[in-house]
């Protein structure tokens, strides 16, 4: 798929998800604006709101909404989507927290020479940590089974 086709596909994914989420907000009688953009090879949709109701405890409601939005895209397009959803800036705040956590763990791994095991995280959170570790030139791997899957950071060889 060339760059133009990819962009068109991602635009379609974002539009379908945004329409689905706008309908959901209307049904739930909730306020929120929808922002759509693409980053890399992924469509991103953000619900801009002051309410954390659609985030839920530890982002559980947000994750469920993302799954539903992806399902709506798949139903409409016939193709699996990697769409990312954010609500009330939760994912961006969490990304910043995880980048700080990963940086601290990198320092610990470098100083001790021992692998550092982080707490269990969802796939989004693990990806953020893996990206920070890779950028620092260290190694990381996910270990364990859901819901206890976690990242282990090591100096590598």
Image: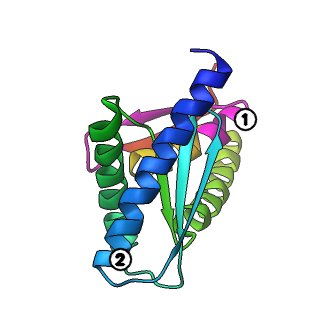
Residue at disc 2, secondary structure: helix
Q: In front: 144, or 60?
A: 60
Which image quarter holds the N terminus?
Answer: top right
Horizontal and vertical percent for residue 40? Answer: 65, 35
Q: In front: 93, or 29?
A: 29
Q: Residues within 10 Å of mark 1 (few under 14, many from 20)?
A: few
Residue at 37% x, 54% y is 66
Give me the C-alpha separation between circle 2 and circle 1: 42 Å
Residue 99 is covered by the magenta coloring? no
Residue bounds of the magenta highlight: 131-149
Specify the farthest residue to the top. Answer: 1
Horizontal and vertical percent for residue 149? Answer: 33, 44
Which image quarter holds the C terminus?
Answer: top right
Among the 4 quarters of the image, the one containing residue 76: top left
Residue at 25% x, 40% y is 145
Q: Residues within 10 Å of mark 2 (few under 14, many from 20)?
A: few
Query: In the drawing, does residue 61 fall left or right of residue 83?
Result: left
Residue at 67% x, 21% y is 3
Horizontal and vertical percent for residue 131? Answer: 63, 38
The residue to which callout 1 is attached is 135
Residue 146 is covered by the magenta coloring? yes
Q: Are marks 2 and 1 in contact (CB under 8 Å)?
A: no
The residue to which callout 2 is attached is 26
Residue at disc 1, secondary structure: helix
Among the 4 quarters of the image, the one containing residue 134: top right
């Amino acid at each position: 798929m060339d760059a133009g086709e990819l962009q068109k596909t991602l635009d379609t994914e974002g539009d379908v998800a945004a329409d689905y989420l706008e309908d959901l907000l209307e049904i739930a009688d909730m306020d929120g604006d929808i922002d759509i953009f693409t980053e890399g090879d992924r469509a991103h949709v953000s619900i801009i709101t002051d309410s954390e109701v659609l985030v839920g405890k530890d982002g559980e409601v947000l994750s469920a909404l993302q799954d539903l939005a992806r399902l709506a895209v798949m139903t409409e397009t016939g193709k699996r989507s990697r769409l990312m959803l954010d609500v009330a800036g939760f994912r961006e705040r969490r990304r910043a927290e995880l980048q700080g956590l990963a940086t601290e763990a990198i320092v610990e791994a470098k100083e001790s020479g021992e692998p550092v095991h982080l707490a269990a995280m969802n796939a989004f959170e693990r990806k953020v940590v893996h990206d920070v570790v890779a950028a620092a030139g260290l190694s990381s791997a996910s270990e364990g089974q859901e819901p206890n899957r976690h990242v282990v950071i090591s100096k590598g060889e």
